[in-house]
Image (cartoon, rainbow, N blue to C red):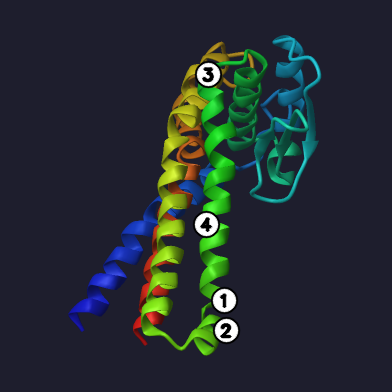
Amino acid sequence: MTLLLLGALLAVLIYVPSIWVRHVMNRYSEEREDLPGTGGELARHLIERFELEGIGVEETDPMRDHFDPNDRMVRLSPENFNGKSITAVAVAAHEVGHAIQFHRQEKIFELRKRYLPQALALNRAGIAIMWCLPVVGLVLRSPFAIGAIVVLSLLLQLGGAFTYLIILPEEWDASFNKALPILRRGEYIDKHELPKARRVLRAAALTYFASALANVLNIARWLLVLRR
């Protein structure tokens, strides 16, 4: 019973950042007619303003806002691409912040370029190995070999979780060294709205951190499954 309570408490603590990120994004996603444009329009305007040649803007899947350096594209989810809200404006500014990092060839942008593919690869490899465990168990029939495979899978997933954390400085820079100074000018939102935009920018910066914690919970779930 105690282990179950501790496990439930751990799950709650791990999910709090993800819940908080979604809560902040939803809280300030209300349509505002007083805003001068949508998130997509703001992104295009900022790209022109900062002369980010070769970089475009397009709509992507829900909750998939990101800047793709390979395609040189700022991608915004439908609600942010078409929406006129504090969330849409702040997220658009955040993603353009990444485009500015890329265009200026700032060293901090190398964090995501170098470590995000590694994080994704490590996590996917760990999960793939775990799903292959039943077949491997039938073939090898060796507790030691099975245990080694389990440890390898968990280490890969844990490595993926920690790799996400390395990207945090880049996300923080995009929010507070790039996007926030842009929004402080008062051209896109009123200055009294800045505290709301700041909360959205903080949530955008912590998205990868929330993903890292979700990976840790995934590892804990695998451990519970294996105990059975």
Q: Amino acid at mark 2?
A: Val
Indicate the quadrant containing the C terminus: top left, top right, bottom left or bottom right: bottom left
**Label 1 amino acid?**
Cys
* 3 and 1 marks in contact (CB < 8 Å): no
Q: Nearer the viewer, residue 117 or 84?
A: 117
Q: Quadrant of residue 125?
A: bottom right
- The residue singled out by tag 4 in the image is 123
Check whether the beta carbons of the residues at disc 4 and disc 2 lie within 8 A of each other.
no
**Separation of residues labelled 4 and 2 (CA atoms):** 20 Å
Q: Which residue is mark 1?
A: 132
Q: Earlier in the sequence, mark 3 or mark 4?
A: 3
**Do labels 2 and 1 touch, CB within 8 Å?**
yes
Q: Work out which quarter of the rendered image holds the N terminus and state it.
A: bottom left
User: Could you say whether the residue bearing mark 3 is in a helix, strand or loop?
Assistant: helix
* Residue plotted at (49% across, 44% down): 208
- 4 or 2: tag closer to the N-terminus: 4
Circle nearer the N terminus (2, 3): 3
Residue 110: image location, x then y, percent: 55, 26
Point out which mark residue 107 bears. 3
Q: How far is disc 1 from disc 4 in space, using C-alphas?
A: 14 Å
Which amino acid, by three-letter code, is at mark 3?
A: Lys
Q: CA distance from mark 3 to mark 4?
A: 25 Å
- Mark found first going from the N terminus, 1 or 4: 4
What's the residue at 43%, 78% (across, down)?
146
The CA distance from mark 3 to mark 1 is: 39 Å
| In contact (CB < 8 Å): disc 1 and disc 4 | no
Q: Is residue 193 visible?
A: no
Q: Is residue 148 left or right of residue 140?
A: left
Residue 63, horizontal then vertical, whole percent: 64, 49
The residue carrying mark 2 is 135
Badge 1: few (under 14), some or many (20 or more) residues near its Cα, within 10 Å?
Answer: few
Residue located farthest toward the left when viewing the structure as drawn: 2
